[in-house]
Structure formats: structure tokens, C-alpha cells
């Protein structure tokens, strides 16, 4: 799981400079959905916590 998250992070970092803001946001939401599905946790909600991420 950690390796997959690291790969997502690397892809996002690589894409951020090349993608339009809306494309990057769409990609980020798709990754959040994939992480949520794989872990059973709502990743976007967990990451929005004040003391996290």
C-alpha cells in the first residue's frame, strides 16, 4: 500500500507542472478515490483533518 501511495505521489508531482489546474485536480480526486477504495478509508476526509497531512 505504501509503495502504491508513493507512486501516486510521484506521478502527481510529475504531472503538476505539466497539467492544467483542472486536470491536476481531477487526477488528485481520482487518486483519492483509488486510495479510499483500496484502504476502506475515506482518504480525502482523513487528509482534511486539522492535525494531519
Image (cartoon, rainbow, N blue to C red):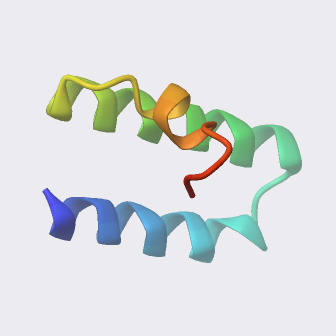
| Residue 11 in the figure: left or right of residue 42 | right
Most extreme residue toward the right, as rendered? 21
Q: Quadrant of the N terminus?
A: bottom left
Q: Residue at x 39, y 23 (%)?
A: 42
Which residue is at the front of the view, 17 or 47? 47
Instruction: Answer with the quarter of the image where residue 13 lies.
Output: bottom right
Instruction: Answer with the quarter of the image where residue 49 lies.
Output: top right
Percent across and percent down for residue 23 are 74, 42
Question: Is residue 30 in view?
Answer: no
Q: Residue at x 31, y 28 (%)?
A: 36
Q: In which quarter of the image is the C terminus?
A: bottom right
Q: Which residue is drawn at 72% across and 40% down?
A: 25
Q: Which residue is drawn at 45% across and 36% down?
A: 32
Percent across and percent down for residue 45 are 53, 26
| Residue 19 in the figure: left or right of residue 7 | right
| Residue 33 in the figure: left or right of residue 28 | left
Instruction: Answer with the quarter of the image where residue 28 lies.
Output: top right
Percent across and percent down for residue 14 are 59, 76
Q: How many labels does the image show?
A: 0
Q: Is residue 21 above or below residue 9?
A: above
Question: Is residue 6 in view?
Answer: yes
| Residue 25 in the figure: left or right of residue 29 | right
Amino acid at each position: 500500500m505504501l509503495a502504491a501511495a508513493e507512486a501516486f505521489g510521484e506521478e502527481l508531482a510529475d504531472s503538476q507542472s505539466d497539467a492544467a489546474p483542472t486536470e491536476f485536480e481531477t487526477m488528485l480526486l481520482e487518486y483519492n478515490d483509488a486510495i479510499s477504495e483500496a484502504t476502506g478509508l475515506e482518504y480525502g476526509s482523513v487528509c482534511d483533518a486539522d492535525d494531519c497531512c
